[in-house]
Image (cartoon, grey):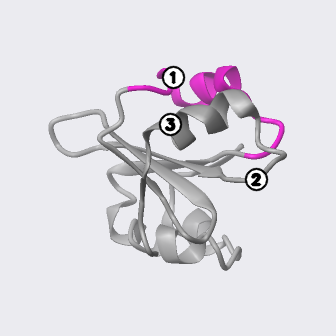
């Protein structure tokens, strides 16, 4: 799992399918922590990294670029987590299925 909590870490991501999603969070890095799920990550891995269950998101989008974006607001000041899950066959099904079941589609 890749965890992004600084602008430098965000700017270091070069995946062209992720960059358009990530650039929206550049000015919010003082409030957001971003978790990028990798093929070996499970729901337990995600829970350990975030300290929260993978539920009760504010919204979840399925991007045409092949990524699910789940946003969690955790505090009244707007602080929270963004979890990005690749929609690929090698992504753990326990992470992928809630995304497929609960997301809306976007054009970006």
In the structure shown, which secondary structural element does the residue marked by tag 1 occupy?
loop
Q: Residue at x 65, y 25 (%)?
A: 43
For label 1, the residue is: 51
Q: Residue at x 67, y 79 (%)?
A: 16
- Please tell me whether residue 44 is drawn above or below residue 86 in the rendered image: above
> Along the polypeptide, which appears first: circle 2 or circle 1?
1
Report if the CB atoms under discs 1 and 3 are less than 8 Å apart.
Answer: no
> Along the polypeptide, which appears first: circle 1 or circle 3?
1
In the structure shown, which secondary structural element does the residue marked by tag 2 occupy?
loop
Whole-percent x, y for residue 12 in the image: 66, 72
Q: Which residues are magenta?
A: 38-55
Q: Residues within 10 Å of mark 1 (few under 14, many from 20)?
A: few
Q: Residues within 10 Å of mark 2 (few under 14, many from 20)?
A: few
Whole-percent x, y for residue 58 in the image: 29, 40
How far apart, in angstroms, are the residues tagged by discs 1 and 3?
A: 23 Å
> Along the polypeptide, which appears first: circle 2 or circle 3?
2
Q: Residue at x 51, y 77 (%)?
A: 20
Report if the CB atoms under discs 2 and 1 are less than 8 Å apart.
Answer: no
- Please tell me whether residue 16 is drawn above or below residue 42 in the rendered image: below
Q: Nearer the viewer, residue 46 or 86?
A: 86
For label 2, the residue is: 88
- The answer to which image quadrant residue 11 occupies is bottom right
For label 3, the residue is: 101
In this rendering, which labeled residue sits more in front, label 2 or label 3?
Answer: 3
Whole-percent x, y for residue 34 in the image: 51, 50
Q: Nearer the viewer, residue 61 or 25?
A: 61
Whole-percent x, y for residue 35 in the image: 57, 46
Q: Nearer the viewer, residue 18 or 103?
A: 103
How far apart, in angstroms, are the residues tagged by discs 2 and 1?
A: 25 Å
How far apart, in angstroms, are the residues tagged by discs 2 and 3?
A: 15 Å
């Amino acid at each position: 799992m890749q965890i992004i909590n600084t602008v430098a870490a965000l700017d270091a991501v070069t995946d062209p399918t992720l960059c358009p999603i990530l650039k929206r969070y550049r000015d919010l890095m003082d409030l957001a922590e971003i978790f990028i799920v990798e093929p070996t990550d499970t729901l337990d891995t995600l829970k350990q990294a975030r300290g929260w269950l993978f539920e009760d998101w504010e919204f979840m989008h399925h991007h045409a670029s092949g990524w699910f974006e789940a946003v969690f607001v955790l505090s009244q000041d707007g602080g929270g987590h963004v979890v990005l899950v690749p929609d690929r066959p090698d992504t753990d099904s326990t992470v992928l299925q809630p995304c497929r079941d609960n997301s809306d589609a976007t054009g970006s």
